[in-house]
Amino acid sequence: MKRFAELLDRLVLTGSRNAKLKLMTDYFRSTPDPDRGYALAAITGDLSFAGVKPGVLRALGAERIDPVLFAYSYDYVGDLAETLSLVWPGGEESSGDGPPLAQVVDTLANASRSDAPGILAGLLDELDIPARFAIIKLVTGGLRIGVSARLAKQALSALGDVDVSEIEEIWHGIEPPYEDLFAWLEGKGEKPEGRAAALFRPVMLAHPLGDNDREKLDPADYAAEWKWDGIRVQVSGESGTRRIYSRTGDEVSGAFPDLVGAITFDGTIDGELLVGTPPDETGSFSDLQQRLNRKTVSAKMQARYPAFVRCYDLLRAGEDDLRTLPFRERRAKLTDFVADLDARRFDLSPLVTFETFGELEALRQSPPHPVIEGLMLKRWDSSYAAGRPKGPWFKWKRDPFLIDAVLMYAQRGHGKRSSFYSDYTFGVWTGPDDAPELVPVGKAYFGFTDEELKLIDKYVRDNTVERFGPVRSVRAEPGHGLVLEVAFEGLNRSTRHKSGVAMRFPRVSRLRWDKPAGEADRLETLAAMLD
């Protein structure tokens, strides 16, 4: 347990991607089975403990710690796991490595809901602060250590000197603690493949198209198609098994039973997950969000927001792997393949006719549908290669929208940002000019530099009006407030928000110290963008 705790601690404090890769690779190389496998599963989000939920942790904190002290500590630290691990009584004199990670996982996985709180409390009593932090992060499932599942797989790739795409292709056919996987990576066993049907195929990604790129490219070499504002998915059917994957390889089938039911084919399609009734009705990303990240979806929800896939590519047809074929041939096969599928659930992505990039530029700025966020360019002769190779595919997105908004609320971040107010709610003015009020229109937690983060954090602390746990309201009046230039990819109408609008991918573009808060944009400005 101690080694796993040390790994998490170092990953939290390490900013460099390459340094994180080395930390994980060294850990996997030096840690025996099955501990390293359970550590990997924790990092990739493939561990869950039915008997332990965040509410259990809060209840334990209330039992063992003075509630006023706990409330002040949580407000100051801003992270439940870190707060509990620091103020939990006892264990400071703990020595040794503690129980092995595999033993902890096995104990908690087999604990009933009634027994789990006592078992967890006993472990927290026994361990020191870093190990407590690791156990709490383990059971809640949200490590927040700046490591994605793909980065963990890249560490495995470095361990075994194999391409990460090989690991991604077998990932959904293996289970923790991955002993066969590690044996293969270390040259001690065969590659664990062919154990599950409808496996994930690593996706091909595009590079942003720059001005210099256009000068070097021949338009005749490329096909163009619209880039829709949904979720990139891979839909696979094989031997009766039907799966839907996100582009990172996470299975999302549970949230889309209506789409799963239409996977009657043996093949693998790459496309964009959307809601609506193709080809004429395509819902916004805000509509799609109603169905994302749900464990169950009611019949009413399915009827209101029916899911479908706009098909971009065909990777497999029956037993034939088509990824090595040129795009021109795959596109022809995709056209025939989709023609035999349920038209309510699978829709062929149309190609855009053009002769010059100048024509495409005009189309990019004025697409025929509001849910289009730009264009994709694909070389006619390109194979389907995993990753992001430079040259075969380009994405040419619309320029972002910009508004000036006023900072209203700030919340502490997580991990290395837990000491900073780094998550911001911002608003624009509405109402009469002589009595305007701010209405929140979005939240952002990236786009700014480390130096700008420190400046905003100081501003929040110096101008706090009220506190709500880890959240602070900030003084925001026409004559006093911090204006943020906010960039976002799109805007949709929303009945879930007081403002009536929902932003797509908002981020802080720059700080407008030069602009008085009273001169920030009004809600009418955003409403005009919808018209």
Image (cartoon, rainbow, N blue to C red):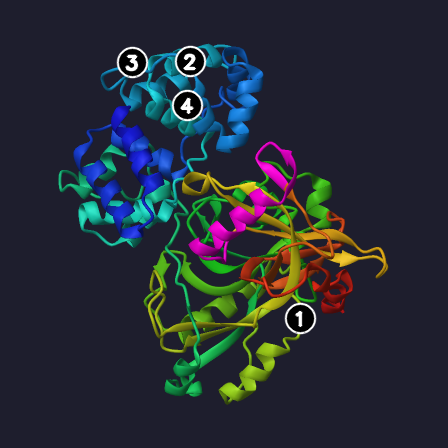
Q: Which mark is residue 276?
A: none
- Residue at numbered disc 4: 86
Q: Nearer the viewer, mark 4 or mark 1?
A: 4
Distance of label 4 from label 1 (alpha carbons): 53 Å
Left or right, residue 423 beside residue 30: right
Q: Which mark is residue 93?
A: 3
Residue 441 coordinates in the image, percent (x, y): 69, 54
Q: Compare marks 2 and 1 and give the one earlier in the sequence.
A: 2
- Residue at numbered disc 2: 89
What residue is at 32 percent from the left and 34 percent from the top?
Answer: 9
Distance of label 3 from label 4 (alpha carbons): 13 Å
Whether 232 is among the magenta residues is no
Residue 489 coordinates in the image, percent (x, y): 59, 64
Q: Which one is in front, 240 or 135?
A: 135
Report which quarter residue 226 is drawn in.
bottom right
What residue is at 50 percent from the left and 42 percent from the top?
Answer: 413
Above or below, comparing residue 243 to residue 311 in the picture: above
Query: For numbered disc 1, what is the local secondary structure?
Result: loop
Label 2: how many Cα within 10 Å (few below 14, some 14–19, many 20+): few
Query: For numbered disc 2, what is the local secondary structure?
Result: loop
Query: For numbered disc 4, what is the local secondary structure?
Result: helix
Residue 280 coordinates in the image, percent (x, y): 70, 67
- Residue at numbered disc 1: 369
Q: Give the residue type that dot 2 points to.
A: Pro
Whether 453 is among the magenta residues is yes
Magenta residues, start to end: 446-472
